[in-house]
Amino acid sequence: MATERIKSEITGTVWKILLAEGDAIQVESELMILESMKMEIPVESAVSGRIQSILVAPGDAVDEDQDLAIIEID
Amino acid sequence: MKAAVLREQNKPMEIEEVQISKPGPREVLVRPIAAGVCHSDLHFLDGSYPYMLPTILGHESAGVVEEVGKDVTYVKKGDHVITCLSAFCGHCNKCLTGHLSLCQSPEVSRAPEVESRLSIGGETVHQFLNLSSFAELMLIHEHALVKVREDMPMDRAALIGCSTTTGVGAVFHTAGVEPGSIVAVIGCGGVGLAAINGAAIAGASMVIAVDMVDSKLELAKAVGATHTINARSGNAVGEVLELTKGGCDYTFEAIGLKATAEQAFQMLCSGGTATIIGMIPVGTMVELHGVDFLMEKKIQGSNMGSNRFRIDMPRFVDFYLSGKLHLDQMISKHIKLADVNTALNALKSGEEARHVIMFDQ
Ligand SMILES: NC(=O)c1ccc[n+]([C@@H]2O[C@H](COP(=O)([O-])OP(=O)(O)OC[C@H]3O[C@@H](n4cnc5c(N)ncnc54)[C@H](O)[C@@H]3O)[C@@H](O)[C@H]2O)c1
Ligand SMILES: [Zn+2]
Ligand SMILES: [Zn+2]
């Protein structure tokens, strides 16, 4: 099955994870919130499918371009 | 309380009734009297910077303390304050080494699992940069405000909350402009005009203002520019190099574009430093000629003027009251909260300086 990796656009910290592994996800739906320089930045999915794995946990530091989750594409 | 709520990018904000929580131990409830409209608000409205929605934009304000949390001793009800998005924790590595504006500690926000500061009918409204000042009340961390003199007019004080601190601070703190330096500032909005004014205060021998709007260049002269260049000519870099006979010691980009950030670097003399203040859209790359590094040209970012705002802002108030900081000229219009969409639209054309919302008292 084809998968898609969701990457961070920015360096920051994982603030809150809004969905769980196994959940269905739609294009543009929000998966988690990152905090960077006092901004609450949404991480959105570019594809529709099911969340295969979430690779980070709340409080984790993330770098620009780092993989945050893997989505199984519908 | 009423606030301008942004529910969808690129859609007008609507004035809605919003619930605001009670101050936690280290929080302060502030009644804003004035709030400036900054181009950064527009970047989040148009999505060039993503943000959690719904939110309430606005991050440049001054007001009066309404209520304080039980552990707050720094301010009391009735104190006049300016807010700042550079809320500092006071004990991380950045804070303890004097770089308060780079503090990333999340503890100045409410933790995600507790009741949010702002909500509508139980739905979280995401606080913008720990402030959200397009609202009749603000609930903020005590480290997101500074007490100021009561003879400071609130509309001018609001500007100090972002544009002054950002522009003047970039000159004083980030770049450290010395007297006699040659300076160019690209973009003469609220932030660029503040950088021009700051360069004049710092004693720059030449302050070149670059913009595409003639009325902005006139304003630039009124706040300290010695020379102006209209970038519509398409050759701003060439004109700066000719005027300075070889380039600037310091340049400042105050727009947020790849092209003008690159121009800021190209306008430098050997050993010069370009400081990028403008918010360049997420994902955009900036290109430089590698050979220029042999001439020790430098490029750096600046966040909120590398401020220590509890020290800086009262000084900027004094600068205004003693006639050095020309905030009167930087306000082009006073508006009502309901007109905030018009003010944000006006920023797109670049024709006007700051619009300041005045709240009914
Ligand atoms: N780094 C920070 O901490 C920080 C803080 C505040 C604002 N900002 C950013 O600073 C930038 C400026 O903010 P502002 O509120 O002063 O904006 P503004 O819209 O008031 O001013 C921008 C000015 O740039 C001019 N301009 C536009 N394109 C130009 C071009 N190609 N060449 C020359 N001039 C041009 C416009 O005519 C206008 O006068 C924005 O990107 C804003 O987000 C950054
Ligand atoms: Zn701003
Ligand atoms: Zn800190």
Image (cartoon, coloured by chain):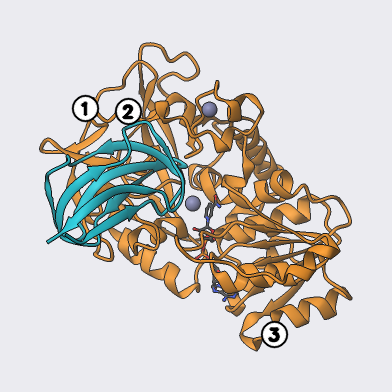
Instruction: Estimate the spatial distance between the alpha carbons at disc 3 and disc 2, rounded to whole Å.
Output: 48 Å
- Between B195 and B32, the one nearer to me in the picture: B195
The chain carrying label 1 is B
Q: Sort mark 1 into few (<14), some (14-19) or many (20+) by Cα contacts within 10 Å.
A: few
Q: Which residue is mark 1?
A: B115
Q: Which residue is mark 2?
A: B110
Q: Sort mark 3 into few (<14), some (14-19) or many (20+) by Cα contacts within 10 Å.
A: few
Instruction: Estimate the spatial distance between the alpha carbons at disc 1 and disc 3, rounded to whole Å.
Output: 53 Å
Q: Colour of chain B?
A: orange
Q: Sort mark 2 into few (<14), some (14-19) or many (20+) by Cα contacts within 10 Å.
A: some
Instruction: Estimate the spatial distance between the alpha carbons at disc 2 and disc 1, rounded to whole Å.
Output: 8 Å
Residue B31 lies, in percent from the top left, at 35, 34
Pointers 1 and 3 within a single chain? yes
- Residue B67 horizontal side relative to residue B102, left or right: left
- Which residue is located at x 51 percent, y 62 percent? B280
Type of the residue with mark 2: Arg
Residue B299 lies, in percent from the top left, at 70, 58
Q: Which residue is mark 3?
A: B235
Q: Earlier in the sequence, mark 1 or mark 3?
A: 1
- Which residue is located at x 75 percent, y 55 percent? B199
Q: Earlier in the sequence, mark 2 or mark 1?
A: 2
- Between B250 and A20, the one nearer to me in the picture: A20
